Amino acid sequence: MNKNIKIVLSVLLVVGLLVLPFLFKNYRVFQFNLVVIYAIAVLGLNMLTGFNGQISLGHGAFYAVGAYTAAVLMDKAGMPYWATLPFAGVVCFGFGFLMGFPALRLGGHYLALATYAFALAVPQLLKYKHIEGFTGGVQGIVLNKPEPPFSFRFLDQPLSADRWLYFFSLAIAALMFLLAWNLLRGRIGRALIAIRDHPIAATAMGVNLPVFKSMAFGVSAAFTGVAGALGAICVAFVSPDSFTVLLSITLLVGVVVGGLASIPGAIFGAAFIQFIPNIADEISKSAPWAIYGAVLIGLMYLMPSGVMGLIRTIGAKLRPAKASASARS
Amino acid sequence: MSKLLEARKLCAYYGATQVLFDVDFSLEPGQITAILGANGAGKTTTLRAICQMVRTSGSLEFNGQQITGKSTEGVVRLGVAHVPDGRGTFTALSVEDNLRLGAYVRGDKHQVAEDMEKAYKRFPRLAERRHQQAGTLSGGEQQMLAISRALMLRPKLLLLDEPSFGLAPLIVAEIFRIMRRINEEDGVSMLVVEQNASLALDLAHHAYLLETGVVALSGPAEDIKRDESVRRAYLGY
Amino acid sequence: MDAFLHQIFSGLANGCIYGSVALALVMIYQATHHINFAQGEMATFSTFIAWALINSGWPYWAAFFATVAISFLAGVLVQRIILRPVEKAPVLTNVIVFIGLLVIFNSLAGWIFEHTIKSFPSPFAQKGMLATSIFSAHELGSALVMLCVLAALYAFFKFTPVGLAMRAAAQNPESARLVGIRVSWMLAMGWGLAAAIGSVAGMMVAPVVYLDPNMMGGILLYGFAAALLGGIDNPGGAVLGGFIVGVLENLLGAYVIGTELKLSVALVMIVGILTLKPNGLFGKHVVTRV
C-alpha cells in the first residue's frame, strides 16, 4: 500500500512540476527557475559540508567561476548556452580539486576561515583590470537570453524564454540530483560520512583520505559551478558585485535550512533563500539578512537537522509500529 | 561527631554508562581515608563524583550540605580541593602563579602569603623554581606543586588521585611522609585514591575497597592491613 | 623618500588596528578554540552606537568610553546567551552560529542606522603640532590609543588576579574549575574584552574609511591574517603580526600589485600561512593524541 501511494505521489509531483510554469506569469516562473538553480548550488555545498564535514564559507566563489565561465564562453566564443554547462562543471571541478589540497591540512574553522577569505577576495579579483578584457571589469557581461527552440502553447500560455529555461534547468537539476544520489548512497557516500565523523578511523580502514577529500571538494565545486552557469544563462548578466561573500553565506543558509547531509533538503533550502528576500524586502532592505542570521542561530538550537530532519522526525512519530532506527546521520 | 562527607547510594555515569552503583561511604573530619581497588574499579570516578565532574545520582553531603547538582567550582568553594590524576598543573604558568591560583577564592591576602611561604618551606624544591614554568618541572616536583596548590585553598577536604603514579619510590616516600605531617599538623582531612595498596594502608586511618563500581570491603586500615586473606584476595600481596 | 616613509608609518598605524582586531580574535580563540567570524561586524555596530551618541550631542570621549563599556557588556551577553548553549557542539554548528551573528549584527546596523555612508569624527586635531608629512595627527593618535589599549590589556593579564584566572581558564578549564574559577564567566569576560577592543578599533578606523555597515569587512580579513601570522594562540604574536600585515599591505599595494587587489594579498597570506606554517611565526605546536 505504502509503495503505491509513493508512486502516485511521485507522478503527481512530476506532473505538477511540468504544469507549474503555465499557471504563473513569467516573473514567477523566473523565480521558480532560480529555486531550481539554487537547489543545485545548495546540493553542491551540502555534499562537501553536510556529508563530508568540510566547512566551506566560499562556495559563492565557485558559483561565480561557473557563471563567468559560461558568460565568457557565450560572449567571447559565441558558444551556445547549453554547451557551456559541461565546461563550467569541469573548470569548477578543477578549481575545487586544487583547493582540496591545502584544505587537507585545515580542519574545522581554519578551512572555514580560508574559504571565507577566498569569498571576500573574489569580487576584487573579478574586477581586476588586467583581465577586464575577458570579465568585463566592474560592468560585468551582459548576455542574450536564450530563446525557446520551438513554440508551444499550453493552458493558453506560450512557451516563453523564462518557461523554456525553467524546463531546461529542471532537466539539468534532475540529472544532477540523480548523480548525487547515486554517488552518495553507495560506498562513496559512506566513505565521505566516515571521513566526516571519524577521519582517523576511516584512514585506518583504508579510505584514501587525501583523494576522497579533494574529490569531494572538486565534485561539490562542479555542482555549484554548473548552477552558477545556469544562473548566468537565466539571469543573462554577470557582474563582480553579484558574487560577494553574502552569496556564500546565502548558500550556507540554504544548506542549514534544508538539512545538512540531505539531498532533498536542498530544495527546501533553495526555496527559502529565494523567497525570503522577496517577502522580507517589504519590511526593510536589511530584514532578509536579519532573518537569515536568526534562522542560522535558531536552527542550530532547535532544528539542527533542518527541514528534512523535522520531516523525518514527524514521519517517525506517525509510524510508531515500524521500528525505525533513530536518524543519526 | 558529624561526618565531613557522606555518600549514600551514590551512582555515577559517564554519559549513558553507569560506573558507580549505590556506593555508600563516609569520611570523618581529620582522618585520612583510602580508596583501593584495581584498574577500572571506579576509584577516580568516586573523586570526580565528589567534585561533580561527572553526572551523579544519590545523596552526597559535605558538612551536612547536599552537593549533588552543584558546579565543580561550587564544590571547590565549599572547601574541597582535588589533586587530579595527571596533576592538573597549569603547565604554561609559573610555579608561583600556580600557587596563587590555588588561593584564588580566598580573600585574606596576608594569610595567603603566609601559606605560600609555608608551601615553599615544606617543599624547598618548589622555592628554588618559583618563577620557572610549571611544565618544566619533574614528575615529583609537579606532584609537590599540585598538592601545594590544593593546600593553598586551606581546604577542609583534600582529594588525591594516585599521588604515587609514575614517581620514583624515594620521591613517593617523601611525599607520603609530608602528607602524613600535613594531616597531623594542620588537621587536613584527606581522601586518597591509590593503586599501591600497601602505601595507602600505611598512610590511611580508614579504607574502602572498590570492585567494579561497588564497595567490596571497608574498615580501619590497620585491620585490612593485618587480614592476610583480604590482602591476598583483593590487594595482591 | 617621504612617500616611502609615509607608507611605512601609515602601515604601522594601520597595523595597530589590525593587531587589535587580531588580539580580539586570539583572545576568543585561546579561551574557546573558536574563531569569532562576527568580530568585525560587532566592532562596526559599536562604532554606530558611538556615532549615535555623538550625534545626539555627547562629547567625543564620553561617547568613546560609554561605547567601550556598552560593547563589553554586549560581548558578555552574546557569550552567555547565544554561545554558551552551543559550547560543546561540533565545530560546524559553532561556525554556523558565528556566521549567524555576523549576519545579524551587519543587518541590524543597516536596519537601525541605514546604509548611507556617514562620517565619524576623529578626536585628534587635523592640523596641530602632531601632524607631519610622514603621518597624520589621526594616524599618530589612533596608534597611541591602540598601544594604550594593548598595554592596559597586558597589565591586566599579567598583574591582576582576574587576569591570571582568565589565562588559567583558557589554558586548562578543568584545572581552573578545581581552584574555584567560574570558567564560563571567564569565557564571557573574554568575549566582553574582545568586543571592547573591537569597538576601539572601529572608532579609530571610522574617521579614515567612513562609517557604513560593511566598514570592517576587509579589516577583519587583515585581522585574521595578522592573527594567523602571529600564531592564533599567541597574543603578542597577534600584535606583531598586525604591524607586519599593515606595512606589507601598504608596500605591496603601493609598489607591487596596486591597490585594487589588496584583499587578495590578505587571502594569499591566510592561505599561505595555513598551508605552510599553520602555527604562525610564534605559535605553539600542539600535538594531540589520537
Image (spheres, coloured by chain):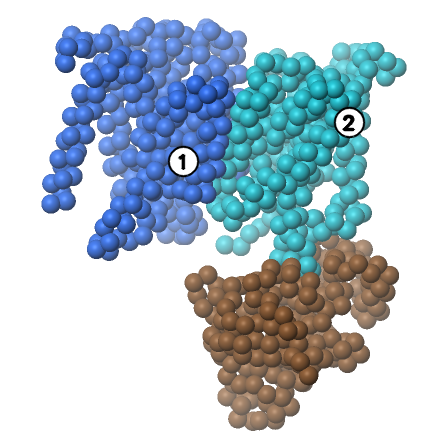
Q: Residue type at mark 2: give it.
A: Ala
| Chain letter behind tag 2 | C
| Viewer-side residue, A263 vs B162 | A263
Q: Is residue A210 above or below residue A122?
A: below
| Viewer-side residue, C245 vs A55 | A55
Q: Are marks 1 and 2 in contact (CB under 8 Å)?
A: no
Q: List x then y, in percent, for residue A278.
A: 39, 20
| Chain letter behind tag 1 | A
Query: Of the residues tagged 1 and 2, which is closer to the observer?
Result: 2
From the viewer's perspective, is B209 left or right of C226? left
Numbered circle sitting on residue C62: 2
Q: List x then y, in percent, for residue A223.
A: 34, 27
The chain that appears brown in the image is: B
Q: Residue type at mark 1: give it.
A: Val
Q: Is residue C101 above or below residue B33?
A: above
Residue at 59%, 14% in the rendered image:
C116
Q: Which residue is mark 1?
A: A256
The chain that appears cyan in the image is: C
The colour with which the image depicts chain A is: blue
Secondary structure of the residue carrying numbered label 2:
helix
Q: List x then y, in percent, for residue C268.
A: 56, 26
Which residue is the extreme one toward the right? C129
Q: Is residue A23 above or below residue B127?
A: above
